[in-house]
Amino acid sequence: MPDNPIFVTRPSLPSLEDFVSSLEQIWNSKFLTNGGPFHQELEEKLVNYLGVPYVSLASNGDAALLTVLKSMDLSGEVITTPYSFVSTTHSILWNGLTPVFVDVDPSSGNMDTSKIEDAITDKTAAILAVHCYGFPCDVGAIETIAKKHGLKVIYDAAHAFGVKCHCGKSVLNHGDASILSFHATKVFNTLEGGAIISHTKTQKDHIDLIKNFGIAGQEDIPFHGLNAKMSEVNAAFGLLQLNHIDKVIEKRKSVSDLYCSLLNDIEGVTCLNETAAGDQHNYSYFPVIIGDNYKHTRDDLFDLLKSHNIMSRKYFYPLLSNIQTYQNYPTATVGNLPHANNLASRVLCLPIYEDLKHDDVRRICEVIAK
Ligand code: T4K
């Protein structure tokens, strides 16, 4: 057994030497934040790298969600998934809106689009869907429903950096807007950070206004916003990360491929990655479903791996609809969300990151197989 734990993830980092050089430029310029040169450059480079119209950097994914919902001036209900990180639903509450849960598709963990129309009422304002683990939602179906009922569509694409649909274009081009997280645990990280993807210059300008308190000029504050700005240090870090992101994703793919081949023969263990549609993935997570025909429960396997110093994670347990804040909402019942409840009790995310050694993947799979 190794002395050091194998964590569920480890951040990819640029060279320290390169980062110190960026820091020296920041020290010399004394421009630390409020849309400085590194911030400008990262926004431009991300537009090109991701293949999207407009990028607004944010201090983190959560602030990006708060900002984008605010920018849409919504009231009433927002249809969303219970199978996500707390930030998704909390952002709805912070904007004075009501979350309405629909169940998920058990093969992807994403919102089951066939359930959306039943959840629409005369108060529904928007759909906030999540590309869970970076697997694209059924964006076509969501778009059709949204158009028919006049709803806004926001994608929480916190996990979906660099993900492309089968058409070869970024998944971030769908909906009225998408958000990304650049947290340390994400495929592309800026220490902390995030971004909002928008489609027009007017939309971007409005988002940029909101993320800067609503301040348009020193004596012009037309809107009440918040502080969701990314600093120059985070932006400079992100620029260095962009130089090696393709290699990072490639290495994660090799880890994912090895897992898939080694876990293939283990009865009761299904790779969620394998069951996803043929889009261009980023291998941000490696979720497996533990079935009844496996010899342990998901929770027992979690403990077993831990006893071998292997730190898997139960993303996303507990289900958002079962936590205190949301459990009394009418749509939070187990009867309404059977697949989401089932997944939350069966999914385990195995370690995956750029530097994870293939020998460690083999050892993890041996523990699971035994
Ligand atoms: N929407 C969705 C769908 C999201 O999943 C998230 C965030 C958001 C919105 C909001 O985006 P941000 O505001 O966070 O940008 C993590 C992250 O904190 C969170 O960003 C992420 N989703 C969520 C799914 O997971 P934990 O509880 O897993 O973090 P932690 O600290 O336990 O880290 C996991 C492992 O990673 C550690 O055991 C070791 C390793 N690690 C972690 C950090 C922070 C490192 O090696 N270095 C590090 O600096 O929450």
Image (cartoon, helix red, strand yellow):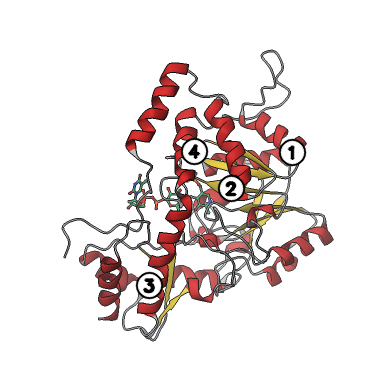
Query: Alpha-carbon neighbours of circle 4 within 10 Å: few (<14), some, or many (≥20)?
Result: many
Asked if the residue at label 2 sits under 8 Å from ligand 1, the reply is: no
Q: What type is the residue that disc 1 sits on?
A: Gln
Q: Alpha carbon of mark 1 to alpha carbon of mark 2: how far?
A: 20 Å
- Say which residue appears at 54% left-offset and 60% top-offset: 134
Report the mark closest to the observer, 1 or 3: 3
Query: Alpha-carbon neighbours of circle 1 within 10 Å: few (<14), some, or many (≥20)?
Result: some
Q: Are marks 1 and 2 in contact (CB under 8 Å)?
A: no
Q: Which residue is mark 3?
A: 259
Q: Alpha carbon of mark 1 to alpha carbon of mark 3: how far?
A: 42 Å
Q: Alpha carbon of mark 1 to alpha carbon of mark 4: how far?
A: 24 Å
Which picture quadrant has residue 119? Answer: bottom right
Q: Alpha carbon of mark 4 to alpha carbon of mark 3: how far?
A: 31 Å
Q: Which residue is mark 4?
A: 239
Q: What type is the residue that disc 3 sits on?
A: Tyr
Q: Position of residue 75 (x, y in %)?
A: 73, 44
Q: Looking at the image, tell me whether mark 1 or mark 2 is earlier in sequence order.
A: 2
